Image (spheres, rainbow, N blue to C red):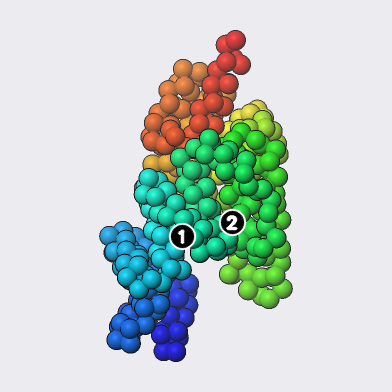
Amino acid sequence: MDCVFLNGLGYAFHLLGQTNKSFQYYKAQLKLARKTQNHEYECRAWKGLGLNYYRIHDQNKTIRCYLNQLNCAELHQVLHQKFSAFLELGHAYSGWFDPKMAIKYFQNAVDIADNMGNSKNKALAIQGLLNTWCILCHARKIRGFLADHNPELTQDLNLYEKVLHYELMGRCFAILKNSRKSTYFYHQCLDTLRKIKEKFTQNNTLQQYDYPSEHYVLHNLGVVYCFKLKDPQSAIQYLEQAYEVAHKIPSTLRMSLTLSVLVHCYCRLGKTQLATEWGQRGLALAQTLEDSIPKGYAIAAWGSVVWHQGQYLRAILTVARGLWIASSLGTVNTQLIAKAFWDLIIEKFS
């Protein structure tokens, strides 16, 4: 029972962001579990330590902890902990943009869940695979999976799991260039988030609400309406909401990314002065970040402003420079920006 309580305290402090306290409880749990040969809770302790090291961005120690969890689970045949270790390794490598390793571990997790006959665990592992395929823009693999699985089967999921499912399906169909289904699932996700928000509001615990997920969904809806459906007016409706939510988090990165898409929308509607103001604000925010992607997108958005000012050659060079700085030519958003600007060029000179 001491191991059970130590594990609960470790996880509670992890959720509260109090990493040092969480480490203390997980280390005490690990020591006790080893002393009493409690292999289940030795595995859980390694997982908890891995979660904390992941939070503080220590990649080597994160992987070491998850591998220790895996080794302990294999040695003592604790199958569900073996599944857990594979799943955490997959998420860690996916978070560090190492898709090859992420796919390897997620596939291992799928195989173990199959052997255990655990459909819910299998669904979690498949979500990891789909997420990694989305990062890689592997449309063929996503299409093949969705051809054999109904993307709307969510009856066994709680509200939080539905949010993850709908958001993932929205991204999948965006990559498959099915804008109708993509927006459908993003709207489903948004509706589910609002139900969760209502519960938090009623309980006076709104500070615990997942604003980052709301921003992400609103932003992605704006992207689809702007670049895919060519409906900048509708896109602005979602992007302005996303910008307000980013302020609540607060997140300079999210504000910068959303501003970049807003600029393209205002340019499309001929609101050049507004696009200029937001574009300058976006550039200023992006310069405060170390990440090259928001900087590149902000510069590419400014290229759109320059284009609508009639400086066509300078605009082309600016957009090209922005996308090069972003260094993410394989991502969906970069491809959408490049295509949208190419369409502008064809429209102007054809």
Q: Mark 2: which secondary structure?
A: helix
Contact between marks 1 and 2 (CB within 8 A): the answer is no
Tag 2 residue = 164
Question: Residue 79 appears at what percent x and percent y?
Answer: 43, 68
Mark found first going from the N terminus, 1 or 2: 1
- Say if residue 293 shows up in the picture: yes
Question: Residue 114 appears at what percent x and percent y?
Answer: 51, 58
Q: Residue at x 38, y 71 (%)?
A: 77
Q: Residue at x 48, y 23 (%)?
A: 315
The amino acid type, in three-letter code, at marker 1 is: Ile
- Say if residue 281 shows up in the picture: no
Whole-angstrom CA distance, mark 1 to mark 2, is 22 Å
The amino acid type, in three-letter code, at marker 2 is: Leu
Pair 1/2: label in front: 1
Tag 1 residue = 112
Residue 53, quarter of picture: bottom left
Left or right? Give the position of 203 relative to 74: right
Question: Residue 232 appears at what percent x and percent y?
Answer: 67, 34
Q: Nearer the viewer, residue 251 or 67?
A: 67
Left or right? Give the position of 241 relative to 69: right
Q: Residue at x 64, y 52 (%)?
A: 166
Q: Residue at x 42, y 41 (%)?
A: 293
Residue 265, quarter of picture: top right
In the current view of this chain or complex, which residue is farthest to the bottom?
1
Residue 325, quarter of picture: top left
Q: Residues within 10 Å of mark 1 (few under 14, many from 20)?
A: many
